[in-house]
Image: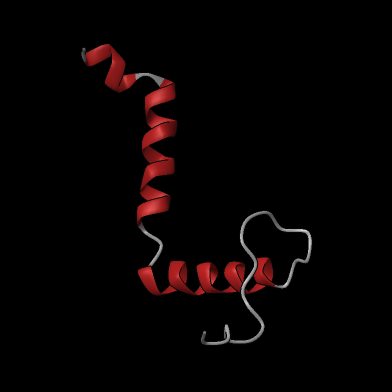
């Protein structure tokens, strides 16, 4: 088991995880907001489209 933690792959993985965890939550939230705005403006996106007007009451 000690060999697994000293391997080159483990060191690279550990460094990558450290970089991901070190990104502040505010930065992640900002990137997610920008991505959502970009995806909403794509007319070819999959899934339900947002309604442009409110549905009429019956």
In the figure, 54 relative to 20: above or below?
Answer: below
- Residue closest to the eye, 11 or 48: 48
Q: Quadrant of the N terminus?
A: top left
- Residue closest to the eye, 50 or 22: 50
In the figure, 47 relative to 29: above or below?
Answer: above
Q: How many labels does the image show?
A: 0
Residue at (66% x, 65% y) in the render: 39
- Residue closest to the eye, 4 or 26: 26
Instruction: Say whether residue 41 is left or right of residue 55.
Output: right
Question: Residue 42 at x, y = what percent?
Answer: 75, 66
Quadrant in the picture for residue 21: bottom left
In the figure, 38 relative to 45: above or below?
Answer: below
Question: Residue 36 at x, y = what percent?
Answer: 58, 69
| Residue sticking out furthest to the right | 44
Residue at (38% x, 30% y) in the render: 11
- Residue closest to the eye, 46 or 51: 51
| Residue sticking out furthest to the left | 1
Residue at (36% x, 36% y) in the render: 14
Quadrant in the picture for residue 31: bottom right
Q: Which color scheme does this rendered protein use?
A: secondary structure
Quadrant in the picture for residue 16: top left
Residue at (63% x, 77% y) in the render: 51
Instruction: Say whether residue 27 is left or right of residue 24.
Output: right
Instruction: Say whether residue 41 is left or right of residue 27.
Output: right
């Amino acid at each position: 088991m000690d060999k697994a933690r000293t391997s080159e792959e483990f060191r690279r993985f550990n460094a990558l995880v450290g970089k991901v965890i070190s990104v502040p939550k505010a930065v992640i939230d900002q990137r997610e907001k920008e991505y959502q705005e970009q995806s909403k403006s794509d007319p070819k996106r999959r899934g339900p489209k947002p309604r442009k007007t409110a549905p009429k009451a019956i």
